Image (cartoon, rainbow, N blue to C red):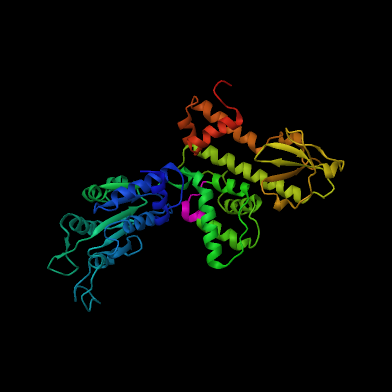
Amino acid sequence: MNDEHIDKLQQSFGILGESDRIKEIVETIDQVARTDITILICGESGTGKEVIANAIYRHSLRKHQPFVKVNCGAIPAGILESELFGHVKGSFTGATDDRKGYFETANHGTIFLDEIGEMPLATQVKLLRVLELGEFLPVGGSEARRVDVRVITATNKDLTVEIERENFRKDLYYRIKTITLTLPPLRKHPEDIPLMVQKFAIDFANHNAIAFKGFSPTALNILRDYTWPGNTRELKNFVESMIVLQKGEVITSSMIEKRLLGERRSMPSPHLPMKINKSLDQAERELIIQQIMMLRQELHEIHEAVTTNQSSVKYDTRRHELELSPTRLTGQPVLVGQGAHHTQIEEKDFEEQENAEIISNDIINQESLGKVTLAEVEKELIQRTLKKFNNRKRQAANALQISERTLYRKINEYGLDESR
């Protein structure tokens, strides 16, 4: 399948992403959507399982027939069976009339059973009968009714674990997993985050008629490096909240850090003993990132206390170059960076420096800081991880939770080839 065809499908499905994982999912949808095969969509909460179900339906041969969505976890267990399969008059107190269930409503169309792992065992038996025989008994009924329905299911649970705990039927599991689509969490394809941020921001700003000037490059980098435990749903809500809070302003790295750090500081102290379900590598990486973000926030707060006539150093995160401010030292142009060109740096508001951080030499004790930059910390982290895995790039990339492509780019950028 060529890239142009995949891109057209993505646009029609509303699926965002340029990573290989997203492209593979779109290609699979194209292959299975036009059949009546049962599909199981797996993934953490917030990864977009309903978006994938919608895409399968719209690309199927039943797209002109009903599409019924049911959240099994949101319906009380005692009435879920009646909601799915209907009931006859007098079958229970309050059943004053016959009522069709969701399956009968979706006849000749598609039904999407979200959070199927929450379905009670008794209801699972009836679902299995529908999948195998195409018939069911309404609650209180004695005559079987037939339906022709395509079934798509989704769960954020590991159903194999639920089978071991006797919370899910093994025969039903094998029946619904004919085709399984596993959606990656956002931290597994961070290269797609900038595209998602821009899409969410533009759509929200246009829908609510809010002025939006965009995100700075360093702000997008911070969003890309964050782990997003709530996945795409959390990212979308965060972007929308930032647009509301920062109306008409360019959203900078300091704004992002302040909000993210504020949310982290409201969590339990990391020094308290707690049970975590993360690997040692992941925990170490998140701790380092947290400390870097806290350090950058503290440096920003120090800068706000610096008067405008004090000398300063500007750190450019894209070029990793230090530029002395000539207007504050001698008022004369000086050589900047590696090129032999002259430049005059104008004084600007700190918040409008898109990807620069200003640090005062007179206020900060350079010896106590160890002259450590964000780039040096990142380089050291990559070096240690590569050494730990004996330069095995794939394992190192998984431990760092970045793509191999990003890891190779960082290795070239910092000169970390094996010969060195």
Residue 127 within the magenta-colored segment of the rendering? no
Q: Quadrant of the C terminus?
A: top right
Residue drawn at point x = 25 percent, y = 77 percent: 94
- Examine the rendered structure and indicate whether residue 253 appears above or below residue 86: above
Choose between 161 and 191: the one closer to the eye: 191
Choose between 117 and 249: the one closer to the eye: 249
Choose between 134 and 339: the one closer to the eye: 339
Residue 244 screen position, x and y as percent: 59, 63
Residue 175 screen position, x and y as percent: 22, 49
Residue 187 appears left or right of 120:
right
Residue 80 appears left or right of 312:
left
Q: Quadrant of the N terminus?
A: top left
Residue 20 screen position, x and y as percent: 43, 42
Residue furthest out toward the top: 419
Residue 134 shows in this picture? yes
Residue 9 appears left or right of 347:
left
Residue drawn at point x = 48 percent, y = 27 percent: 389
Residue 399 appears left or right of 255:
left
Residue furthest out toward the right: 330
- Region rendered in magenta: 227-235
Residue 230 shows in this picture? no
Residue 231 within the magenta-colored segment of the rendering? yes
Choose between 64 and 227: the one closer to the eye: 64
Residue furthest out toward the bottom: 96
- Examine the rendered structure and indicate whether residue 234 appears above or below residue 397: below
Residue 119 screen position, x and y as percent: 29, 57
Residue drawn at point x = 63 percent, y = 55 percent: 251
